[in-house]
Image (cartoon, grey):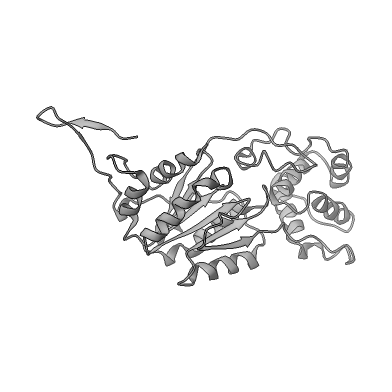
Amino acid sequence: MTEPTPDDSGTTQRKPLVFPSRERMGTPLPASSNTFVGRDREMGEVAAHLSRPGVRLVTLTGPGGVGKTRLSLEIAGEVAAGFTDGVTFIDLTPATNPEQVAPTVAHALGMREAGDRPIADRLVDALRDRHLLLVFDNFEPVVAAAPLVACLLAGCPRLSALATSREPLRLSAEWVVPIPPLTLPDSTRSADEPLQSEAVRLFVERAQAVRADFTLTGANAPSVAEIVRRVDGLPLAIELAAARLAHLPPATLLQRLERRLPLLTGGSRDPRWCAGHRTARHPRFPGPPRAAPHAWHRRPGPAAA
C-alpha cells in the first residue's frame, strides 16, 4: 500500500499521507437515471437524525433489494449542503474482508497512502478537521470492520456517517433506521386508488420507461397490484418486473411469476442487481454474481446540483 521513493542521497523515504484540498475533494454524484419514488417518511426521519448535534451515525437496515443504497444517495443529496466538506459515498463491495475497509475509505476520499503508521490513524489525522458525511454502502459483508467507524467518529469531532447494511453495526453511537418495502395497495380499496401505493407508483414509472403508452387502467390495475404484492414491495424486484412489460402484458407477467421461474433477472444488465443482491434470495427470482465496485463523492453547492 505504501510506495517508497529514493531521495537524492539514495536513502529510501516514504511520502506522508496526502489528503486532497477542499477544492479537489470530489466530483458530483452521477445523475440518477430515473425518478425516485416514495420514501418521504424515511427521508425525513434520517435527515432529521443527521441534523441533530448528538447523532453522528445512522444505519439504514433491511433486506437486499429494499432500496437502501438508492435511499442513502437521495439522503446524501438532501443533506450535502449542511456539510462544509460535502458528502463522500463509499461502496464497500470491493472490500472482501474487514482489513480492506480502511484502504477502501482512503481510496474513496482520494488520499494517497504512504507511511508506516496504521492507516486508521492516518485517516483520523486527515479527517480530524473535516466537516464531512461519510456514506458507507453495503457494510454487512465486512461488519467486523465497524470499529473503524467508531474510531473515525471518536477522533474527528465534525465527522458524521450514514451506513447501509442488512444488519446493524452495533456501535454505541449508532441510530438504526429499518427500511421497509414500499407500501402496497390496499386490497379492500377500489381499482382507481392503487396509485396511492408507493410500490404501484414505482411499477408504473418503470413500466413507462419501456412502454411509453403504458397507463394504469381498471383492467390492468388488479394484475399490477398483485405483481407488486408477489414481490413483497421490494423496489429492485418491482423494477425488474416492470421491465418485462416491454414484451408481456401485466396479466401474463403475473401468471409467469406464479410459476417461480427466473423470469425477472433473465437478461438484466442492471448493475444494482449484480452488485450486492445475489443473496437476497427472493422466492420469485435468483441472484446473479456481483459486478465491479465503484465509489464517488458528493460536494455541496452548484457542482453537485
| Count of numbered marks | 0
Q: Is residue 95 left or right of residue 122?
A: right
* Residue 110 visible in rendering: no
Who is closer to the viewer here, 67 or 153? 153
Q: In terms of depth relative to the viewer, which is nearer, 63 or 37?
A: 63
Residue 36 lies, with reference to residue 284, above or below; the image says below
> Within the image, what quadrant is residue 291 found in?
top right
Q: Which residue corresponds to the image point at 54% horizontal and 41% vertical from the top-left? A: 93
8 and 215: which one is in front?
8
Identify the residue at horizontal 59%, vertical 53% (top origin): 70
Viewer can see residue 305: yes
Left or right position of 268 against 89: right
Across and down, in percent, residue 213 comes to 76, 50
Q: Which residue is drawn at 34% across and 55% down?
A: 127
Observer-nearest of 7 and 267 = 7
Give the farthest residue toward the left. 9
Quadrant of the snapshot with the N terminus: top left
Indicate the position of residue 100 as horizontal and vertical percent values: 45, 39
For this view, does 67 lie left or right of residue 28?
right
Quadrant in which residue 259 is drawn: top right
The residue under the point 62% across, 37% down is 274
- Residue 37 lies, in percent from the top left, at 66, 59
Query: Measured from the top left, where is residue 84 in percent x and y?
Result: 37, 64
